Image: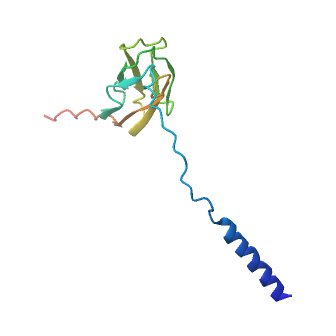
Amino acid sequence: MKKNLICALALVFLCGVVFAQKTKTEKPVETPTTVTPETSGPDINFEKTVHDYGTIEKGANGGCEFEFTNTGDEPLILSNVQSSCGCTTPSWPREPIAPGAKGTIKVHYDTQRLGGFRKTITITSNGKTDRVVLSISGTVNAPAAPAAPAAN
């Protein structure tokens, strides 16, 4: 019984090895590829994608701007601009940006929160680059304590 089981398993293994081998050795026929022209359309190009506030005091102006240009040949539409958290508020142009025209995404960070921060703003558009991620970072410190008056 044991001998029959071992023979059966060996037969299954050999069949698997034999049928797993490639039998076709012919080279596949290559079809010539056609070069398609680069597709036209809108494209978004930012002057900068990172803004570092450095070290700022609590309550300081947390605003910054990211300027972009539509480098494509069709109107650019920003369908969504979303920040990574509620402490960062973006605002953006809702109307289409003509080819060659510039636009600005304004970002405001809530500087009432102390400590280091690193946040992202994701831009979704109809451009060739349909998703761009901007980032802001910095450190918010407590305001310096006023100096004590000198004793006379």
Residue 99: image quadrant is top left
Instruction: Determine the residue positioned at 56% across, 55% down.
Output: 26
Instruction: Determine the residue positioned at 61% across, 59% down.
Output: 24
Instruction: Determine the residue positioned at 35% across, 25% down.
Output: 46
* x and y percentages locating residue 13 in the rendered image: 72, 75
Task: Name the image quarter holding the N terminus.
Answer: bottom right
Task: Name the image quarter holding the C terminus.
Answer: top left
Of residue 16 and residue 66, the one placed in the foreground of this image is: 16
Residue 47: image quadrant is top left
For residue 117, above or below residue 108 = below
Of residue 149 and residue 115, the one placed in the foreground of this image is: 115
Q: Is residue 13 left or right of residue 31?
A: right
* x and y percentages locating residue 42 in the rendered image: 44, 19
Q: In this view, does 15 lie to the left or right of 73?
A: right
Instruction: Describe the colour scheme in one phrase.
Output: rainbow
For residue 42, above or below residue 3 = above
* x and y percentages locating residue 94 in the rendered image: 49, 13
* x and y percentages locating residue 41 in the rendered image: 45, 19
